[in-house]
Structures are given as C-alpha cells and as structure tokens.
C-alpha cells in the first residue's frame, strides 16, 4: 500500500484500544457504585422516615375481621306494652351501613353469658337509654371491656347519648358527677378545641367531620352531660378520657359532646349519629347530605376499629346468637330474653 493510499479501516493502535477499554470499565464501575449508594439511601429513607399518616395521625391497621360483629345491649322498653326490651333499628342500620353485623346482648342476661358474648364479639355498642345511673349490665360490660384491653384485645366500645354519661359515671365512680344540659331534641354544631379534630382517632379519621363545625349535624336527646371544666377537674376522667368536641345548649352552656379513651378504644358521643340517615320521626334531626356523610363516617370509624381483632363465635353455638337484621323497632319478650 502506497503512502498516499488510505486504508478502508484505519489502523488502530493497540495501546489506545486498551486505554479505551479501561476507561469504559472504570465508568461502569463508577455507575455501579452510584447505584449501590442510591439503594442504600432509599433503604435509609424507608426505615427512617415515618409512613404517611391520616389527618389524626392514625396509620391504617391490618384488617383481621372484614365484617365484624357488634354486640348491642337491648334496653327495657318504656313504650311497648307487649315487649320487655327493645333496640331501635337505626342503631342496627348504622352498624350495617359500615359493613358490620349486629347481635343482641340481653339486658337481663347473666354476667357469664355477657362475658361469653363479649369474648366472641368484635365490638360493643351501648345505646342511649333513660336510666339516670348506669344499669348493672352496662357497668359489667364497661369493666369487662377494660379487662379485655388489659389482655391486649382490641375490642372497641361505643356509647351513644345517655350511655356516654354512663361511661363518665362509671369511670369517675360518682353518679352525681353529671351537669344539667338543656339540649334535649336539639341539633348543634360542634367545636373542636385545640385542634383536636385532627389530633384524635375519631375525628381524625376523615375530613368529612369538618362540616360538623359549621352545620347542625349533631342531634342530642339528653338533658344530662358534663361541662369541660368539671371533666378536667376529675383526675380519674382527665387521665382516662380525652374530650374531643363541645357543643352549646339552649342556655349558652358549653358541654362535652364527644370523648375517646386516651389509651383505650372507648368512644362516647352525646349526640345520636344513627338518627341522621335512619330516623325521620323527629323534626330536629338534620338529614342533609353532609350530616349523613358525617354520620356514616363515624360508623365506618367504629366498625373499622372492630376489624382490628380476630374474635370469632364458636360455630357450634352460633345458633343461640340473636342476630339483629330486622326493620323497625326490635322487640323482645321475656321468653326470649336469655336466648
């Protein structure tokens, strides 16, 4: 080949090719090193940075029971001459709307029978009654639920209306601790002091509850309750319950409208959320879309709490359980009281 002739493929210097390969391998090693560092940083972030939380700081819990059973205490009938005990169907529909199933706790059942039901149920609801002092059945349920909590069994207790007052009386050990609240048949807005709408388990569950600060979605039936200052002055109450919301009665008096256990899944509301969607017999009930949404959100919160335990009924004894899935007011005669 003459000097003035160029080859089709230029001659490559061997040393140059070796240096090129070494540079290529060095770049690959550098990139691999960067990848390792990136993975390490991601791992540190995952373990060091907390998971995203709900408004109330509540991380979603594992569902152990998709359709939990809620035990509801039946109460002596004051209006039905042919029934000994009743449960208003609005409570049952409220539970069912969130995917739960209701069963009855007979008011006059023995402590052993009640204990057996509580150990199998996933949650308990105490409906509002008419007794000024906690009935024996409610007292036993409250104390037994506390015992279950001591054994690390997450069984939520929900108390509505007068039953919330029972919780205050039982925990304080003082049946005279309640104040006069002029809020019977009154729908109110709620106030959430100190940002507790976002700092509580109950109201931190959903942003829907914001509407309760502006609209009269909370309907009360009770003439008894407790003032915030009196609750704060009781060491036994202040150390166990957190007041979540307040309302104003007809006399301009502020009273506690909702509570939750500080360390226990125990909840009480002075108002009746089950009425908004299912009770059209009272003119003071707010049936607006926002009121119904807040009512349903409370049901979903409570039933969601009940999903966090794996209690089950013995299949050989489920035929003795009184399932509540009827329309209208549920009536029970003496002959069925202990079934």
Image: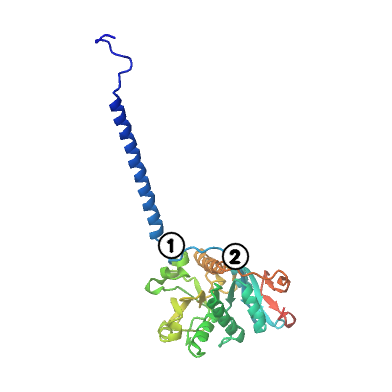
Residue 31, horizontal then vertical, whole percent: 35, 41
Between 156 and 103, the residue placed more toward the observer is 156
Percent across and percent down for residue 34 are 34, 45
Residue at numbered disc 1: 53
Instruction: Report the residue at 52% width, 66% height from top.
Output: 297
Name the quadrant of the C terminus: bottom right
Distance of label 2 from label 1 (alpha carbons): 22 Å
**Residue 127 got which mark?**
none
Of the pair 183 and 267, the residue shown nearer to us? 267
Alpha-carbon neighbours of circle 1 within 10 Å: few (<14), some, or many (≥20)? few
Residue 225 location (% of width, % of height): 49, 83
Disc ID at residue 65: 2
Taking 279 as reference, is 43 left or right?
left
Q: Residue at x 70, y 79 (%)?
A: 332
Identify the residue at horizontal 49%, vertical 87% (top origin).
Answer: 172
**Secondary structure category for the residue under label 1:** loop
96 over 166 or under it: above or below: above
Q: Quadrant of the rendered structure where residue 47 is? A: bottom left
- Lower position in the chain sequence, tag 2 or tag 1: 1
x then y, percent, for residue 278: 59, 69
């Amino acid at each position: 080949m003459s000097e003035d002739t160029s080859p089709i493929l230029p001659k490559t210097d061997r040393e140059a090719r070796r240096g090129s390969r070494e540079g290529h391998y060095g770049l690959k090693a550098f990139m691999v090193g960067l990848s390792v560092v990136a993975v390490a940083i991601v791992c540190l972030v995952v373990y060091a940075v907390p998971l995203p939380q709900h408004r109330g700081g509540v991380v979603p819990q594992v569902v152990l029971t998709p359709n939990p059973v809620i035990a509801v205490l039946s109460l002596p009938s004051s209006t039905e001459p042919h029934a000994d005990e009743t449960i208003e169907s609005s409570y049952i529909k409220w539970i069912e709307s969130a995917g739960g199933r209701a069963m009855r706790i007979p008011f006059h059942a023995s402590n052993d029978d009640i204990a057996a039901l509580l150990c199998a149920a996933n949650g308990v609801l105490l409906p509002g009654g008419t007794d000024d002092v906690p009935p024996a059945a409610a007292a036993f349920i409250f104390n037994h639920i506390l015992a279950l909590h001591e054994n690390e069994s997450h069984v939520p207790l929900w108390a509505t209306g007068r039953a919330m007052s029972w919780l205050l009386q039982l925990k304080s050990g003082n049946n005279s601790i309640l104040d006069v609240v002029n809020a019977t048949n009154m729908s109110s807005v709620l106030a959430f002091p100190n940002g507790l709408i976002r700092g509580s388990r109950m109201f931190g569950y959903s942003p829907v509850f914001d509407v309760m600060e502006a609209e009269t979605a909370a309907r009360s039936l009770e003439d008894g309750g407790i003032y915030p200052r009196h609750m704060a002055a009781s060491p036994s109450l202040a150390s166990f319950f957190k007041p979540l919301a307040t309302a104003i009665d007809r006399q301009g008096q502020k009273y506690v409208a909702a509570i939750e256990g500080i360390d226990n899944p125990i909840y009480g509301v002075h108002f009746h959320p089950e009425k908004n969607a299912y009770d059209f017999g009272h003119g003071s009930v707010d049936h607006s879309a926002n009121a119904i949404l807040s009512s349903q959100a409370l049901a979903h919160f409570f039933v969601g709490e009940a999903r966090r335990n794996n209690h089950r009924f013995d299949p050989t004894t489920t035929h003795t359980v009184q399932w509540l899935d009827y329309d209208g007011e549920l009536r029970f005669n003496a002959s069925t009281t202990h079934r």
